[in-house]
Image (cartoon, rainbow, N blue to C red):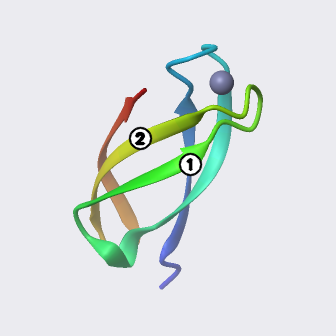
């Protein structure tokens, strides 16, 4: 099973959407990722099952 799942993240700072790989083996977790467009940090709250992203919330 592929535990890395690609999702589209929409940046709360600049509004751009970019693809990001999520490690779904970590279950419910928070990660901080820099926007690939404006380089500002985005806090992502993720709920995952192995191989599947159940929900994602982007916060600045
Ligand atoms: Zn951005």
Mark 1 — residue?
Answer: 33
Question: Does the rendering let one see residue 50?
Answer: no
Q: Residue 46 carries which label?
A: none
Badge 2 or badge 1: first in the primary sequence: 1
Label 2 element class:
strand
Which residue is pictured at 22% across the width and 62% down the height? 28
In space, the residues marked 2 and 1 are separated at their CA atoms by 7 Å
Which residue is pictured at 56% across the width and 17% down the height? 13
Q: Position of residue 32 (x, y in %)?
A: 47, 50
Mark 2 — residue?
Answer: 43
State the residue lying farthest toward the bottom.
1
In the rendered image of this protein, does residue 4 appear above or below residue 6? Answer: below
Which residue is pictured at 31% across the width and 52% down the height? 46
Q: Quadrant of ligand 1?
A: top right
Image quarter of residue 59: top left
State the residue lying farthest toward the right.
37
Question: Does the rendering let one see residue 26?
Answer: yes
Image quarter of residue 11: top right
Q: Position of residue 7 (x, y in %)?
A: 54, 47
């Amino acid at each position: 099973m592929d535990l890395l799942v690609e999702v589209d993240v929409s940046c709360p700072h600049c509004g751009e959407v970019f693809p990001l790989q999520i490690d779904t083996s970590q279950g419910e977790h928070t990660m901080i990722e820099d926007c690939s467009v404006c380089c500002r940090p985005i806090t992502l709250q993720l709920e995952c099952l192995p191989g599947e992203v159940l929900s994602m919330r982007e916060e600045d």
